[in-house]
Amino acid sequence: MKNWDVIGINEFLRDNPEMSIKNLSNTCLVIAGNYSCIAYHEKGGDTDLNYNLQIEIPAEFPKAIPIVRENSHLIPRDKKHHINRDYINKKDSLCLGSRIRILQTISKYPTVTGFVEKCVIPFLYSAKKGKFVFGELAHYYEGIVEDYEDIFDVSGSQNVLMVLNCLSKKKRIANKLFCPCGCGKRLGKCTFHLKINENRHLASRFSFRQEYDQIFQEILLKQKAMHILYK
Ligand SMILES: [Zn+2]
């Protein structure tokens, strides 16, 4: 049984008395209720935030990312507002940014409060102001690829895939692959391997493999669509 208090669940509930535990299992903890705070940003000033939120925290946190749903329906459900639509279960979730970017943040702040303050509040603040003042959040795979180009300082979706491929393999095997930086050497012979290694602890190799497969599929789909368009 996971000790949920390691991630500061009691502290968070004490600070947010209108939120409470809705479900608890070995794999997930669900908290929900009214979340309110005053958020501040130097460009946009103070603003009151008041939303009905549901936060599903996986047991692997901070190596897996919580899902956040906004049940008060104050945020428009469109691409501009970064909402992941779920038409089948009618359970939309907030698109908080690219996976590695969030994992990097929560590995530095591995508590529920840290996650909410660093990942959720900036989102709600931006959604309310109608402008993503905390930086444009990546959305869909093109945004994710762009964000990974930025994080790893590589260019092109092919090189982003090579990064994820390296992260999904053991060091010994990854070091024999061609380096994603484009130097033409093996990863092990380039200082780029340091950049790969410092991100390894963020999540499991299996989950990096899953993300590789997802992005690869998206790129294939897009290429097929282009092919049909320009045939
Ligand atoms: Zn290199």
Image: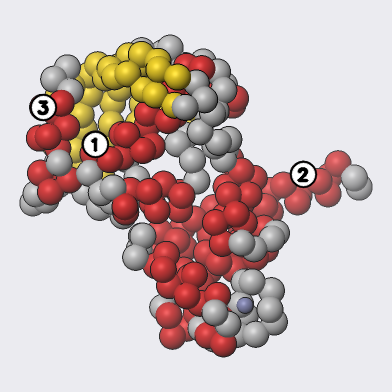
Q: How is the image coloured?
A: secondary structure
Q: Quadrant of residue 179?
A: bottom right
Three-letter residue code for mark 1? Thr
Circle 2 sits on which residue?
225
Q: Which mark is residue 113?
A: 1
Queried on whether the Cβ of the residue with tag 3 lies below 8 angstroms from ligand 1, the answer reads: no
Queried on whether the Cβ of the residue with tag 1 lies below 8 angstroms from ligand 1, the answer reads: no
Image check: 89 left or right of 132? left
- How far apart marks 3 and 1 lie (CA) works out to 11 Å
Q: Residue 93 at what x, y percent from top left? A: 41, 29
- How far apart marks 1 and 2 lie (CA) works out to 42 Å
Q: Residue 126 at what x, y percent from top left? A: 49, 24
Q: Earlier in the sequence, mark 3 or mark 1?
A: 3
Three-letter residue code for mark 2? Ala
Secondary element at tag 2:
helix
Q: Is residue 8 above or below residue 159?
A: above
Q: Earlier in the sequence, mark 1 or mark 2?
A: 1
